[in-house]
Image (cartoon, rainbow, N blue to C red):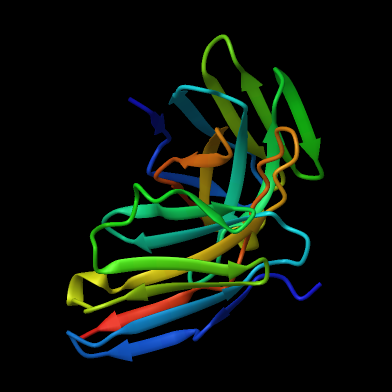
Amino acid sequence: DAGVIQSPRHEVTEMGQEVTLRCKPISGHNSLFWYRQTMMRGLELLIYFNNNVPIDDSGMPEDRFSAKMPNASFSTLKIQPSEPRDSAVYFCASSLIAGTSYEQYFGPGTRLTVT
Amino acid sequence: GQSLEQPSEVTAVEGAIVQINCTYQTSGFYGLSWYQQHDGGAPTFLSYNALDGLEETGRFSSFLSRSDSYGYLLLQELQMKDSASYFCAVGGNYQLIWGAGTKLIIKP
């Protein structure tokens, strides 16, 4: 398997622009997670899906952030409008939740810079 | 509330042994995981303990004591490539609660 795929790997945009990050989870995994990582705040869980359904979006910072998972092989995280404080590395991870297995597989991340 | 405590930084010498501790306070505990992250990379899974005791995987071992809400990661025969950040994470309700990470610095 190719692992979790994220695109783009790097994104530089201006404040106020819309940003869309994309993720393809590992085939057969039933859970998908979006994380944000910064030096100041560490690794933060933004939202996670189970069987394509959003289970917990309490980590989404504000209404400017939205996430969708239209099918088992694709998810997007959208920021509209973007702000400089959104600059971070955004990771997508997938997992096969079975019993008490909590091994998550991370994609390479998208480094977002908002100027 | 839910929290995990781990040291922010640990320094060790190449070839030595180092232990990274993690204490947690969470609801719905299902197990303790450890992840490694190199600078500029993504977290990668190292180990998972659901039951008390020691799990060994090559040079890495992980320990859990549920009664003490405590675990540790033990790295033996340290190599320069082990320089990275190490995160403990507690599983509960289908998601992980993450510690802030421990930066391991290895000196030759």
| Residue A3 vertical position relative to residue A52 in the rendered view, above or below | below
- Image mark count: 0
Determine the residue positioned at 43% across, 86% down: A10
Q: Residue at left 39%, top 45%?
A: B100
Asked if one can make out residue B98 in the rendered structure from this viewpoint, the answer is yes
Residue B86 location (% of width, % of height): 53, 48
Q: Residue at x 41, y 78 (%)?
A: A111
Which quadrant is home to the C terminus of chain B? bottom right
Front residue (pair A34, A70): A70
Question: Where is B61 relative to B44, above or below?
Answer: above
Residue A81 occupies which quadrant of the picture? Answer: bottom left
The answer, for residue B107, to whether it is visible in the render is no
The residue sitting at 43% across, 69% down in the picture is A90
Q: Residue placed farthest to the top in the image?
A: B67
Could you tell whether B37 is left or right of A10 in the image?
right
Say which quadrant the N terminus of chain B sits in: top left
Residue B26: image location, x then y, percent: 44, 24
Q: Nearer the viewer, residue B48 or B13?
A: B48
Compared across the picture, whether A49 is left or right of A66 comes to right
Q: Position of residue B68 (x, y in %)?
A: 53, 12
Residue A57 image offset from top left, x and y in percent = 39, 51
Q: Nearer the viewer, residue A99 or A52?
A: A52
